Amino acid sequence: MKKMKFLATALFATVLFASCSSDDDAPVEVNEEEVITTMTVTLNPTTQGTPVILRTQDLDGDGPNPPIVTVSGNLAANASYSGQIVLLNETEDPAENITLEVIEEAEEHQFFYTTSAGLNVTTAYLDFDVDGNPLGTEFTLTTGEASSGTITFTLRHEPTKPNSGLSDAGGETDVTATFEVTVE
């Protein structure tokens, strides 16, 4: 009988000890990915000429319809453009401007611009986070001689900063879009 009382007490103490563990840790804040349906890249010539608009829209996300990709015109040779990227969630009414959140969380985001070998353009960042690392919602694009190829815009969430480019940035891709462009 004494053994039974001892075992019952030991079992009760074990259950009590296990149930009183410290679970008072603060919950980890979850930063949910935003839905991005539309990326618009506006390239305004710094001297004269017509702006060029690069746009991709995918209202059904991973649905059966492919994104609608448009390029409003060609880039001028030997010219400089001021670029701005706007991201929207058009599943909301009115559309939500996701760019504002990307700017607010600049330390956690970075745009990368990747061009194909045949395209004669260079890019440079114009906006930065509080630590002086690139953000990339604003940039310059400078064209050389006539050429054609692709330019890809990739937004990474929580990249390693600083980095030497997309290849060592890490993080998760929030959105990426590739556009066929011509410099004439």
Image (spheres, rainbow, N blue to C red):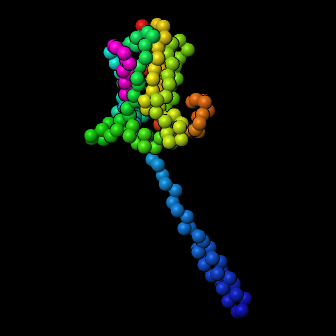
Q: Position of residue 137 (x, y in %)?
A: 43, 32
Instruction: In this rendered view, identify the residue nearer to me: 135 or 31.
Output: 135
Q: Position of residue 11 (x, y in %)?
A: 65, 80
When the figure is inspected, residue 175 is found, relative to residue 52, above or below; the finding is below
Q: Residue at x 70, y 87 (%)?
A: 6
Q: Based on the displayed image, in which of its 4 quarters is residue 53 positioned?
A: top left
Instruction: In this rendered view, identify the residue nearer to me: 144 or 7.
Output: 144
Image side of residue 132 versus residue 49, left or right: right
When the figure is inspected, residue 92 is found, relative to residue 140, above or below; the finding is below
Q: Position of residue 179 (x, y in %)?
A: 44, 20
Q: Residue at x 60, y 78 (%)?
A: 16
Residue stretch in magenta: 40-49
Image side of residue 166 versus residue 96, left or right: right
Q: Position of residue 7 (x, y in %)?
A: 69, 84
Q: What kind of secondary structure does the magenta stretch mostly adopt?
A: strand
Image side of residue 129 versus residue 40, left or right: right
